[in-house]
Image (spheres, helix red, strand yellow):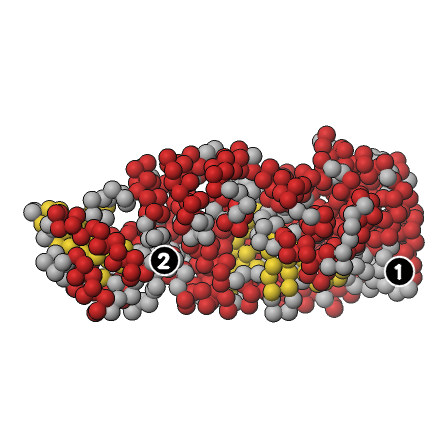
Amino acid sequence: MPNYDFHELSPYDFEILTRDLLQAEWKIRLESFKTGSDGGIDLRYAEDGNKTIVQCKHYLRTGLAGLLKTLKKEATKIRKLNPQKYYVVTSLPLSPANKDEIVATIGANILSPSNVLGQEDLNNLLGRNETVERQHYKLWLASVPVLNKIINNATFVNSSFAVKKAKAAIQTHVQTQTFAEAMAMLRKSRVVIIAGPPGVGKTTMANILLYEHVREDYEAIVVQENPREASQMFQDGVRQIFYYDDFMGTAFLGDREGLLSGNRDRTLLELIAMIRDSMHARLILTTRDHLFNQALSHSERFRHANLADEKIVLQMSNYGQGERARILYNHVHFSELPVEYQSELLDNDFYMEIVRSSRFNPRLVEWMASYQRVSKIPVEQYKTFVRTLLNNPSEIWRHAFHEQISDAARSLLLALYSIGGSADVTDLESLFSSIHSVRAARYTIHRKPNDFNLACKELIGSFIEFFELPTHEILKLTDPSLIDLMDGILLEEPDNGMDLITGAMSFSQINRLFLFAIEFDETRRRLCERLQQHADTVRKEVRRILTSESHRIGTGRPRADNPSFERRLHWVLQITDEWRDVLLMPLVEDLYAQMTSAWCNGGPTDIESCARLVKLIDESSMQSLRGLTEIMEACTSAMVHAASRGCSSRELAQLLSALQSPSDTNMAETLRNGYEKYRHSRFDAEISECKSAAEFGGMVSDLRIIEDVLEIDISEDIAEVESCESIVAQGDARQADLDAQYWTDHVSAREMSTDEIRGMFASLRIDRD
């Protein structure tokens, strides 16, 4: 028998559950009435002279005492109704003595103990009616066994998930038709892309999808940075669900460039194809819709991958009035918002103004329902605050950033922003110290030894979140919209850009900043101009970062941030070419010297970056880059030398794509010999490492480039890989539509009337005395 405590249900949810259970048990249809003016009736059956009345009493907050107090007030009203049968249904656990108290309060002539249903009775009915249990997803998704699966899953623990966060997401989630479509898509094609603007609920939906699969004994794997991580963890025949949040990056161009550079788009598409080919794996991706569309325009591979077929777009226009109302209601009911603030929402149906607002979105609702965030707002100003939040959401953050936090807190937010919004605490403290010292000297800010700890305490719970994991601790921005806020502050106050460059400790930071400044709209132009005004300082600080042997970067866990010198040199030339400015050109000589010195000392050659570097110089229209023939020749020679000793098929294909064709007979022969070494030493290993038809297909594409450019017959090798590709591609798809129709039909699309919404919100007045 199920053993639910029903704490995850709101009074509205509880009434609907009671209705569905009794209808299933009694094989009748019950009428529902709006809360607050029901005349003592929540549910009713009235046919053939039989009048059965049911009252639903959740009363989690005030318990049995509150329930008895309310029933005592209603007793006279119930007697006047004189029903043939009268039931009291409560989520409270009841002893026989408790039931006798309830009967005595109403009157034994109206109510019998057998018609008083408590927690144990409801669980018994759920055990007899499994279909009803399945329909009420909040029950089983927030049950102890499922939550234990979530919190004991190593991926969740290492990805900053916690019991409190999981329960909160489940309690406030409203399962819409879009959710059902996303689940059906996962069942059918095993991949879903949830796209939409900030704050619309992408991450929440993805989390609930993830929880549902964990409940079904899937292993959850959260991709942190690179899709290759997921490919390496893929196990054929094992139930796995992969989750890649914001896979196109945030508003930073650096994130987008990182995905689309270095064949990372190909790596992601191979992962997607791998999941599509598997009967046991699933993949959830989230992204902002405009970034997805930009990626399609930047990457030919994305355009030909038919990803749009697996995209679910979340927009507020997808949410009906009833769904919006339930989102607001759930957040308020399960919040710690004091009664006085809730009364403001209920006053003159103010909640309807929120529900009907064109700016309504779940993120704003979460904010206005969080007492921690609105506690400084006087009750009498709460409505004005909410209207301001709806009219211009960014102004709330902006005002708090400029007026309500300390200088140290602003430095901490800038530091966290510069590395993408999430960092290991130790790494972040070092970075904060560097940036804060720069800002303190520049703006005459008084510093204290414990500024970092004070800033953390000030921001945790509003701007940032703290997570204590088994191996380390991390801090992250509470809300993706904070990235947008910091973007705006950086562009409006470009001196912040100089602070970040001067205080930077990693290549990643300057990479993000410069790529962010590439797009030349008028606002970004101000940032570019400020960097150019301080050209000497910019070059000095960028040289410090680029010529350093290694760095550390906070990304939620420590790791080396040590790109090859080939990658660093390519970055400088890329910025020069895309920015159409020679600001960083004086750094080329130093980086070139370090790159060649590393080669002379036996260091490995980064063939991929060398190939990109050669291609960039060859195709650039800037004379200052076209003249770098010495670098082109040196990179070509280094790549050919590395390939002659044996490299991967992908590296050799990239080399040949950059060169178009070998420049002389000796080079061609050297590369042919290099392929023979690869064939004998690495070919079989590469085949064994391929896990999907897409990976085999990528290997075939590389081999065809090698065959065409080097003019060698490797048709047997290609045929061997194609044979493996064909075998994998023939994977059994007989279960492709498993559950799809169920999830498509799972959520009722019936809209709520205004009266029904009023009735739902009226329940907020109940069980609070």
- Frontmost of labels 2 and 1 is 2
Q: Residue at x 78, y 40 (%)?
A: 495
Q: In the rendered view, tell whether residue 470 sits above or below residue 286.
A: below
Q: Secondary structure at mark 2?
A: loop
Cα gap from disc 2 to disc 1, whole angstroms: 70 Å
Q: In the rendered view, tell whether residue 486 sits above or below residue 717.
A: above
Check disc 1 and report the residue beneath it: 599
Q: Residue at x 60, y 61 (%)?
A: 467
Horizontal side of 76 relative to 407 (left or right) equals: left
- Residue 49 lies, in percent from the top left, at 7, 47
* Residue 86, image quadrant: bottom left
Horizontal side of 654 relative to 101 (left or right) equals: right
Please name the amino acid that badge 1 sits on: Trp
Check disc 2 and report the residue beneath it: 61
* Residue 301, image quadrant: top right
Tell me if residue 363 can be seen.
no
- Residue 536 lies, in percent from the top left, at 90, 42
Please name the amino acid that badge 2 sits on: Arg
- Residue 278 lies, in percent from the top left, at 50, 60
Q: In the rendered view, tell whether residue 237 sits above or below residue 109.
A: below
